[in-house]
Image (spheres, helix red, strand yellow):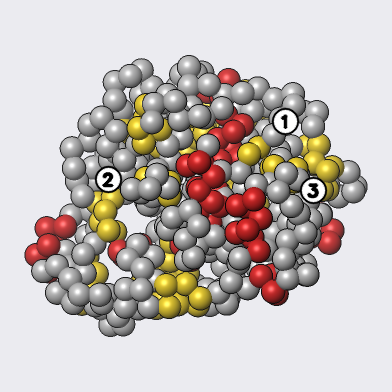
């Protein structure tokens, strides 16, 4: 379980900075992906034997277990995990209709490394009421349980969860989310583009919302877009999630869900969720011990412009004309991004080095042959194994065996399939971003 341990600790701070090894001083999140989830009663476990034609069976259904700490309007515990998933027909088209409140059953057994990383947060003195976490290794922490954080007052006092989330985002609450997932997705044609937006772009099989790579913030106006797993690494809980306007969500991998679906990395990962276009999202493994490989790569700013660089080693002085076509060249920018490795300040006033890979503009699609474990520009593929086209959550493994989330993390940056008319998601056509304040995270 060493690799999972390194991954989940990657999330112990703000919204998952996952670059850096386990125990690396630049990130406490590197150990968050190893946290153990224990005892999930009365739920159906997903397996990778489920097919794309039998979506209903993939969902974790629970109508019994209720949360101890997240409360409804009557002060009662909210029912955890998905409440229902059934096949319905709308205007002759079959969908899987899912009803959920978005509250998961994540019960975590704390490890020494998890506690160490929490206490080593850069702002632990003020992030925690007592300057350190109040839980110890071996403690079982339920979703929303107070572990000593000085949480935001947003929603927490009324709906519960105070002390479980670090300062910044508010606490999640019951959402009553309805979602239709088309059973037979239709691909967009080559002339159509559907960018994933800032709000929910899918659901995990336990009903938790899937958010894309961004946090809605930029370094300058409409340029140098923050990657949420980098910029919000100190915003997430011990299961690598947090809330936006009360909606709990993940931007990337979490071992809490891996435990729920039984993903041990000893075979092709099972389904973790579904994108709004209907295609399934599988976990990180293509086969036993083999990770699916993102087709996106980090730019070399010191390379020539013909190679997608700026000829300015260590400096962000240009952007790609088309991140999907390196041959299209680059263009200068009105405002340079921070130098590679320069410190930037996050919304939580934490200081993080903006290493290469911190911004969306740091990446390009390499257009390598989509074969074996390699994924396409949407972070998916069809290997002919009977699963059909599907997305993957993506991770990379360092030389020391440390696993770290890999851009674009889940599906995207663009949907592969069309969004149905009754979809809960929309194509993002906006160029407006937030350069201050708390956006929809």
Disc 2 to disc 3, how far (Cα)?
39 Å
Identified at 81% across, 37% down, the residue is 66
List x then y, in percent, for residue 26: 47, 66
Residue named by callout 3: 70
Q: Which label was assigned to residue 39?
A: 1
Q: Is residue 372 above or below residue 32?
A: above
List x then y, in percent, for residue 331: 19, 72
Element type at marker 2? loop
Front: mark 3 or 1:
1
Q: Earlier in the sequence, mark 3 or mark 1?
A: 1
Element type at marker 3? strand
Q: Earlier in the sequence, mark 1 or mark 2?
A: 1
Relative to the observer, which residue lies in front, 323 or 250?
Answer: 250
Identified at 63% across, 58% down, the residue is 116
List x then y, in percent, for residue 370: 22, 35
Mark 1: few, some, or many residues within 10 Å (few <14, many ≥20)?
A: few
Residue named by callout 2: 295
Front: mark 1 or 2:
1
Q: Earlier in the sequence, mark 2 or mark 3?
A: 3
In the image, taking residue 299 as reference, residue 286 lies left or right, namely right
Identified at 84% across, 61% down, the residue is 157
């Amino acid at each position: 379980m060493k690799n999972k341990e390194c991954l989940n600790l990657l999330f112990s701070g703000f919204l998952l900075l996952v670059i850096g090894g386990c125990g690396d001083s630049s990130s406490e999140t590197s150990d968050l992906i190893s946290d153990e989830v224990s005892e999930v009663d009365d739920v159906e476990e997903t397996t990778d034997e489920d097919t794309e034609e039998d979506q209903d069976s993939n969902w974790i259904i629970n109508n019994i277990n209720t949360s101890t700490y997240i409360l409804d309007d009557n002060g009662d515990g909210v029912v955890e995990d998905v409440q229902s998933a059934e096949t319905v027909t709308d205007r002759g088209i079959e969908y899987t209709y899912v009803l959920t409140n978005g509250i998961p059953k994540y019960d975590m057994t704390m490890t020494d490394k998890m506690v160490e990383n929490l206490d080593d947060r850069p702002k632990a003195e003020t992030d925690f009421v007592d300057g350190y976490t109040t839980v110890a290794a071996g403690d079982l922490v339920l979703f929303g349980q107070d572990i000593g954080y000085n949480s935001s007052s947003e929603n927490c006092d009324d709906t519960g969860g105070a002390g479980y989330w670090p300062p910044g985002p508010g606490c999640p609450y019951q959402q009553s989310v309805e979602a239709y997932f088309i059973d037979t997705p239709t691909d967009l044609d080559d002339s159509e583009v559907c960018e994933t937006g800032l709000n929910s772009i899918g659901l995990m099989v336990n009903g938790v919302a899937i958010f894309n790579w961004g946090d809605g913030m930029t370094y300058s106006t409409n340029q140098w877009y923050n990657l949420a797993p980098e910029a919000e690494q100190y915003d997430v809980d011990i299961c690598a999630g947090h809330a936006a306007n009360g909606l709990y969500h993940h931007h990337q991998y979490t071992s809490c869900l891996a435990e729920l679906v039984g993903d041990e990395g000893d075979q092709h990962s099972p389904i973790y969720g579904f994108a709004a276009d209907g295609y399934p999202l599988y976990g990180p493994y293509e086969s036993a011990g083999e990770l699916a490989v993102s087709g996106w790569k980090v730019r070399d700013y010191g390379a020539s412009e013909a190679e997608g660089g700026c000829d300015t080693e260590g400096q962000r002085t240009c952007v790609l004309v088309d991140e999907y076509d390196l041959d299209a060249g680059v263009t200068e920018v009105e405002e340079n991004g921070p130098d590679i490795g320069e410190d930037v300040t996050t919304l939580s006033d934490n200081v993080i080095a903006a290493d290469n890979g911190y911004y969306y503009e740091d990446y390009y699609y390499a257009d390598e042959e989509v074969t074996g474990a390699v994924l396409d520009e949407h972070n998916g593929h069809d290997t002919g194994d009977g699963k059909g086209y599907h997305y993957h959550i993506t991770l990379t493994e360092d030389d020391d065996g440390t696993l770290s989330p890999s851009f674009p993390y889940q599906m995207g940056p663009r949907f592969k399939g069309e969004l149905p008319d009754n979809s809960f998601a929309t194509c993002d056509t906006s160029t407006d971003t937030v350069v201050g304040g708390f956006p929809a995270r």
